[in-house]
Image (tube, grey):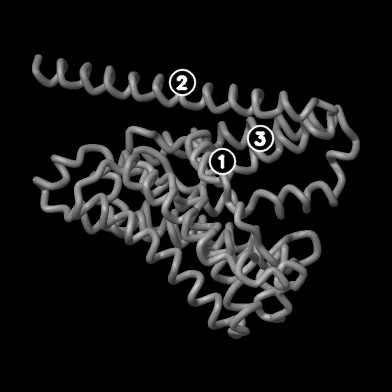
Amino acid sequence: MQRKQLMGTLSLLTILLLIVIIFSLVSPNFRTLNNLRSILSSYSHIAIMAIGVSFPILLGEIDLSVGAIMGLVGMVMFNLLLIHEVSGPVAIVIGLGIGILCGLVNAFLIVRLKLQPFIATLATLVAYRGIIYGISGRQLFPETTVKAITDPIYISIDGRIDIVPYAFIYLILLVMITHLVLQYTRWGINLYAAGGNEMAARLSGINVNRIRVFAYAFSGLCSALAALILTSRMRSTQESLGLSFELSAIAAAVIGGVSLRGGVGNTVGPAIGAFLTGTLYTGLTMAGVTTYAQPVVVGVVLIGAVAYDKFLASRRVNHRSQKDMQYGG
């Protein structure tokens, strides 16, 4: 399984490299260091969210609320830093905590109330969006709309080392940690088992609900981290922060080889998938392709990724059937 995932990741990297080469030939501006820095900066937070949402997907479930969690954390940061004048470190801890709490609410609805993940996270998406407008400091205190976050520690979240943004460094660390957890710990093995066959996992003594709670909490944490990065960059926020980002994150995860059926995938692929999508958008813009056509191209790529996922799933089923027949024979 690890070898197959490695081959899939290498194939994805090859596709990304081909896209970079093509756009570099089409547009000289694409191959500049400034453009590279722009891509790393603009899509690292999407990659972080994609890693987070991959955990519920690995269980064969979904988290549609990640964009709304980002918006909620961003608005709380705005209120704490500009209205209540909370220090940066305290605000950061609170923001990450809110992301985890939102994920735990999703887990509660799914584990305790037995709601379908799609319905539960769709409901919290709407609820979190409502809370954003309800607590919006921009609406309650209109004078804050022209103020910027000035806390030096909070602003430093989105710094950079030469052309490498801190957001990309956070991403690399997150990929390394999650990869080690998934591939080399009992918890990761149990997560794959639960995603591949929940009933068999339960019968083998795996606490599937505990894994589910952690998966949604971690998804919320990643959304909160992405919110901190963006609000630090903008030095402000808006009520629409994170709107439709859940689609980008889920698309990056699927393009990155995380199976919607659960049990298959890693956290390296979603990160690559996010930059593949971002590179497509950036390259198409520089190539002069109209803005309206760009989502169509990316949509075709996503459809191709889902179709490929279905093809691989069929191959796995056929392979298992053949092995069963041989064993029976």
Q: Tell me residue 310's x, y (percent).
A: 39, 22
At mark 1, the secondary structure is: helix
> Of the numbered discs in the image, which one, if any, rests on residue 16?
3
Q: Which residue is drawn at 52% across and 23% down?
A: 303
Q: Tell me residue 177's x, y (percent).
A: 46, 61
Q: Nearest to the eye among marks 2 and 3: give it.
A: 2
Q: Which residue is drawn at 70% across and 33% down?
A: 280
Crowding near pointer 1: few (<14 within 10 Å), some, many (20+)?
Answer: some
Question: Which amino acid lies under the numbered mark 1 shown in the image of this protein?
Answer: Ser
> Of the numbered discs in the image, which one, if any, rests on residue 188?
none
From the viewer's perspective, is 251 left or right of 237?
A: left
**Precedes in sequence: disc 2 or disc 3:** 3
Q: Nearest to the eye among marks 1 and 3: give it.
A: 1
Q: Distance between the residues labelled 2 and 1?
A: 18 Å
At mark 3, the secondary structure is: helix
Crowding near pointer 3: few (<14 within 10 Å), some, many (20+)?
Answer: some
Question: Which amino acid lies under the numbered mark 2 shown in the image of this protein?
Answer: Ala
Give the residue pinned by disc 2.
Answer: 307
